[in-house]
Structures are given as structure tokens and as C-alpha cells.
Amino acid sequence: MKRRNMWTAAIMALVILTMSACGSASSNKKAEDQGSTAPAGTAKNGGSLVIAVQDDPKVLNPIYAGDRVTLTIDQALYAPLFNVNGDKKTFVLAESLTPSADNLTYTLKLREGLTWHDGQPLTADDIIFTMNSILDEKQHSFFRGSFVYDGKPLTMKKVDDRTVDFVLPKVSAAFEGMLVQIFPIPKHIFEGEADIEKSPKNSNPVGSGPFKFKEYRAGEYVTLERFDKYVGGAPKLDSVTYRVAKDPNAANLALQNGEIQMRMIDTQDVNTLKNTGNFNILTYLEGRLSYMVFNLNVDVMQKKEVRQAIAYALDKNEMITAAYTSGEYAEPAASILTPDTLYQTNDVEKYDHNLDKAKELLAQAGVSNLKLKLAYTNSNKPQTSLALYVQQKLKEVGIEVELMPLDITAFGNKSLDMNNKEYDLSFGGYIMGFEPDAYRTLYMSNEAYNYSHYKNADFDKLWDQAAVQTDTAKRGELYKQIQQTVANEMTVFPIAYTKGVVALDKRYGGVEEAVTKPVVMLEDLSKLYVTE
Amino acid sequence: MKKNILRRVLQSIPLLWFISVVSFALIKLAPGDPVNSFVTPNMSAEDVERIRHSLGLDQPVIMQYFIWLKNVLQGNFGYSLTNHRPVLELILERLPATIGLMGSALFLSLIIAIPLSIIAASRKNKLLDRGIGMISYIGISIPSFWFGIMLIYIFAVKLHWLPSMGMRTIGVDSFWDIVKHGILPCAVLTFINVSMYSRYIRSQAISQLEEDYVQIQYAYGATKRSVLWRHVLKNVLLPIITILGMSFADLIAGAFITETVFSWPGMGSLGISSVFGLDYPVIMGITMFSSFMLVIGNLVADILYSVVDPRIKTMR
């Protein structure tokens, strides 16, 4: 008996472990947005807001933030230098950012009288310290690569307490787009820290955003309280709490029960919550593209006509209904750049649904009885619906599709394999932000995330030229060519620009001023208030 | 006896080592790379490589294992790959919530299951026994996440009697507040435990009721009540000890699903997060802790066997 128990023990432990086979979800990045409606009502100061997040935050230090939860909390805890919303640039900590005539030096001027949450002044030294920490390889920040140009790092020069010169080793039109991601960290806290990432000081973060850190209880919640000296004006709410709610069904019930007041929800849950009459549903473009990619490692996918035929055979509006219940939650996409991205254009081949043309192209390519494999993430509901749709729809042009649902990590590994030939088609989605240069890692020939494996030296040259072109008209023209090339070559089939859907308790106002924002839901929580 | 205990403890060392090797291998065999859980497409390939190196993930798996083992032997369980806090700290911070929830569920389950199943056994195949049997079948087969959601819907959303999630009201730090939050998850675990335990205990009690000593007691004119509660109960303790031995590890490992549904900040929810992030130092930490507790639990159970029933020679 006892010997058997020992082995049962071992086996039990292992059963738990085999759960490791479940994947790790890859997270995404920020970008900009489009507005939404808010309730009218009399604003009143005070009150609190509880926002649901799906997991504990990781390191509450913005130079290491890459996942949704941490980015969301950092958004309230830290302030950026400036924000970009479409064409509009709003300065936050900074007062101005001026490029020199040769575009090699950017002068950043900070506002007057900035302070950290602990009352210490926020100066040029903090900005330089933050950038140095990011550039220091020993600190393994996630952003180092964004400020290194052909192996040469960006350098900083302090002009005075409020002014910093950023000196670029070569012209980069993308510099501002990279700088917008930076939330400064305090020098007086982290100076001399051998490993900032592991520093216990991260569990008592000091930022400069609208809310300051109050309490973190692991597995339960993070509470922030108002910071009256916030540069954008004192917040209206007294406190904001991010509550960990892992199970989506339970979280929706907590929302209905009033324990949570704001949560990003699935489109399927919209009606249930709407019917309670207690919520405003905010929908806004997430700056996200949902797409299908052709794997050009496979011989038959090398034929442009086949790719184009498939594009013509599919109907984007039907795909949106299948995956996102209605056109309210996604817009048909034509360009690989999302609408919030600079130089995005709709002047590309749209591949409106056309069966005859699809059949014609397949005949031209000389292929028949095509059998294709379509890979997607098995736990992703919209992708599953899209896959079933594609399977049905491509039958009309005589293409048989075998579905290949994959575990998220297994899928991730296969897609990063440069020689992968295991499937012909696959689904994906990305949020890349407003700077088009950020997209290069997904499209240039030898980049790790070039899932289509499309290789074209001339196309690569366009990306390189666009990155250093500072004349906006010429730069726009280059990005237009890039978008048109992908559409004409049809290596990636854009399906839809999807929307974020957030339920917010009706008693809260000020959403328009707070501005909806991809990934983090609201850009500036200081503007939110409780109505009476 | 002391020598025996010592021998058992020593015997458990190779077992724990074996568990650690297989666990580590399984985590590493799982598809995916822990770095993927926080890498975004706009990070450069060099940044990704640098991070992988800083986490020691560029080393061969065997080396990673020995580095881990060396550190553990020195009492260092390493740092979480995702939030970079010491694993020991993460585990200790979650332990009270889990022990509180699992401990009270275990205690309640036994308090309910023992009398219930003895009563069922004494009325074998009568209506009451059938009823208890039916309910316990439901309890065994009901998925805990569904049952949890139903309880939340009824008691929190509809009746507003209890909070639906978490361990405390934000900013409130009182014992009663925690108890209030614990009622629903504890009810789920207790219902499921009672259903399982009562099957064991009932069958043990039935076989005891057929023993000669029971007939003799009756022959001497003992009442049914005294037979059941004074004699049968004692003999029914044996399977209960087995249950306790096995449940010892649960006290530490927590309940993955129930804790997730109720957002209970215990080891189960830490386990789920680390499994999804392939955070192997944390997974290994939890596995080693709970395996160790299971070994200890079995040891204690074996000792208790001999105390309860001296006929059983302790540990050969």
C-alpha cells in the first residue's frame, strides 16, 4: 500500500506538470485609437474604479513591460513624454521635441515643475538615466533594439535640467515613434541598482502618472491612489484598483454584481451585459489587424495566381460576421497597415469577392484539385470560426482545406521556423502601433516574423528607404508602395481591423477625455469621473 | 520506530530527485519558449537573444537542470522568469490563502462525510442511503468550474448574499471579510470532497457492519447507536487516514480550477499562471513543495495506521 502511494504521489505530481503542455500566450504592443461615446451627467470628485485584469502584473517597471496587464497598470502609474493619437501629438511630461536641421539631433524640453510621486523633482537626469538603463545590455530592457542603429546606440546630452539632446548615429524617421513608448523611471530610486529588473524597489513603484502606487496583494489586486500634482491636472477619482479575475465567465458575473466596474469583454458577451442596462459598451479600433498568411515555403503557394485566387474566393464581410458576430466589432481590411498607422492607405487592390475571377486565376495557374492545410490557434474562437468559413468557402473554387488547429505555443514555434512547410495557410493578428517602421520585422525577407517567407530584395529596399526618409511626402509614397506591393503580391491577406470592446459601468463619465486606447483600454484615467 | 522514520525519510530522497528530473524534463519537452510570453514582434532579434541569455535559457537543458538542482540544494529556488521575484517568496506569499481554503474544506468535508456515510451504511439500500449515494455521484461527476459559476450566479449575482470573487474586499483587512469570500469556493471543494470520501467510508462501514464483533455487540443487547458510533466509527478511521495522507499535498498545491474560478489568490492560481507562462522555476518550486508534502503525508499516515490499529506493524 505505502509503496504504491509513493508512486501515486510521483504520478500525481507529473499529471499536474503535463499541463505545462498548455501554451504561453504571446502578448502585444500599444498603438493609438478612435474615440467612443460617454454618458452625460454631473461630474463629481472622488470615488473609485475597479478594473478587471486577467492576471497579476509582471515587473511594474515600464522598461520591462510587454504584456497587456503590466502595460495597462503602467499607463496610470507612469506618464509618457508625449502621446500620439492619429495625426495629433499631445505633450505630457515634455513640452516640445524639436529635430535639428540635419535630423540627427532631437531636443527634448521638459515642462516646468515636474515631480515624481514621492515629491522628488523629475528632471533631464531622469530622462537620461531611463535611456541609459534601456541601452545598458546588463539591464536587459525590452526596448534596447529600438534605439540602436546599425549597432550604434543613441546618445544623450544634458543641456540643462529641463533639456536633453538625443543624438542619433544616423537619420531615423522612426525615432519619434520609438520615443513615444518610453515612460521615464526615477533615477533617485534606481541609481546604482545592479539588476533593475530584479530590484525589490519595483514592488513599491514610483512613477509620475495620474495615480500613485498604494498597495499590491499578489493574486488579488493592485490599488493606486490619486496624485494631485499630475502634470495633466489632478485626477477626479480618488483611487483605481486593478483586480485579478482569471476566469472570464466569473469576471463577467463580478461585473454584473458590481464588484468590478470596467473590463475588456468578448463580442459574444456584449448583449448579456447590455441587457442589464448598467453598462456602456465602448468599442474602438484596437489598431489590430487580423490576417491570413500564405506560406511561400510551399511550392504551390509560390504561384501568385493561386494566392490571388484564394483572396478573390473569400468574402471579408462574411468572414467578419462569422468571426466577430457583426460589422460593429470589426472593419474589412485591405492594407497591411492598421488605420491608426501613419501613411496607411486604402489605395490598394481590395480583392472584392469574385468567384469567376478566382476560378479563372486558378485555371491560369494550371492547378486543380488543390489540397491545402490551414493552421490556427485552437483556443482562439474567432480563428476557429474563420477556419470553418474558409474551409466551406474554398470548396466553391474546388480547393479542399484541411484544418490544423494548434496549441498556441506549438503554433508559435512552427511559425518561427524559417523552413516550415507543415501548412500552407495560417491565421494571425498583430498590434504594431502608429509607426510604420515597426512593421518591418513582419515583412522584410530575413526577419524572424516574416511568416509568409516572401523574399524580395527590392521590397526590402523600400523599407530601408522609408525608415530614413524624413520628407513626409516622400516617406508616405514609399509606404504606399509597400502596402501596394503586399496587396498585389498577395502574400498576406488582410481580413479585418478588429475592435476592442470594453464594458464600463454607466455611472462613470469622462470617457471622451480619457480617450480609448488599444491594449490599455483608456489613455488617461485622470479624466474619468463618477456621475451623480 | 525512530529508525524506521529516518529510513523512510531517506528513502524519499531518491523519489523526490526522480520527481524533479521527470518534472523538469516534462516542462522542457512542452512546446514553446518561456521568452515568447513577453516578447513582442517589435523587439529586435538581438533583444530576444539577450533576454534568453540573461535567463539562462540559452544553456543546454541538462545544464539548466543541474544549475537548478545546485541552487535548490543550497535552498535557493531561483527567480520567476516572468516577474523576476524569488520563487520562495512567491510561494510563501500564496501559502496562507491556500492552506486556509484547503484546510477548512478538508475539515468540513470530514465532519460532514463521516457521519453521513456511517448513517448511509447503517441504512444500506434504503431511501436515505440511495439519496446520499445519488448526491455523491452528482458531486463526483460535476465539473467544479461549472458548479462554481452556478454558485456565484445564485448567491452573488441573484441573491447578493456573498461576494463573487477574490479573498477580500479591496482595502478591507478583517477575518470575517475573508471568511465571507471563502464560503463559496469552500462550498465547491467541500461538496466534491464529501462526495468522494463518503463512497470510501460507506463501503468500509458496510464491511465492518458484517463483522462478527458487531453481531456479538447486538447479541449482548447493545443499541444500534452505540454500535455505530463507538465501535464501527473507530474501525472506519483507517480509510480516513489514507484520505488525510493523500490530502496533505493538496493543502499546499491548492485547487487549480476552483481557485481560478473564484480568483482565490492561492497556490493553484499561481500554478496556472506559471504553467501558461512556462515559468519553470515556479512550476518546479510548486511541484517540489507539494511532492514533499505528499511524501510527508504518507509517512504520517503510516505512523497513524499503527497507532489506530496496533495489528499493523509500523513500516515493516
Image (cartoon, grey):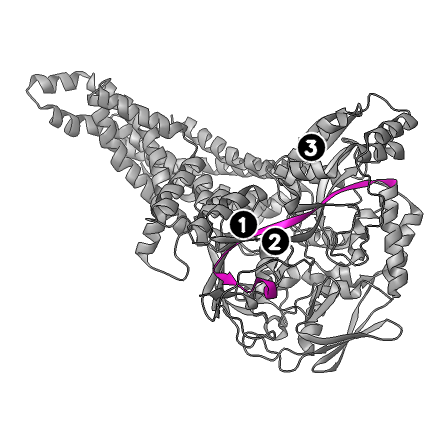
Residue A276 on image: x %, y %: 46, 48
Q: Residues within 10 Å of mark 1 (few under 14, many from 20)?
A: some
Q: Quadrant of residue A282?
A: bottom right
Give the chain letter at badge 1.
A
Query: In what quadrant of the picture does the N terminus of chain A appear?
Result: top left
Q: Are marks 2 and 1 in contact (CB under 8 Å)?
A: yes
Secondary element type, mark 2:
helix
Kindly identify which chain the residue marked by label 2 belongs to: A
Please say if the residues under marks 2 and 3 sit with CB atoms less than 8 Å apart: no
| Measured Cα–Cα span from mark 2 to mark 1 | 9 Å
Look at label 1 and name its amino acid: Gln
**Is A121 placed above or below B129 here?**
below
- Quarter holding the C terminus of chain A? bottom left
For label 2, the residue is: A68
> What amino acid type is highlighted by mark number 3?
Ala
Image position, residue B210 (x, y; %): 20, 16
Name the magenta segment's main secondary structure: strand
Verify whether residue A350 appears in magenta. Answer: no
CA gap between label 3 and label 1 equals 26 Å
Q: What whole-number distance in Å separates the C-alpha atoms at marks 2 and 3?
A: 26 Å
From the image, state whether disc 2 or disc 3 is nearer to you.
3
Span highlighted in magenta in the image: A489-514
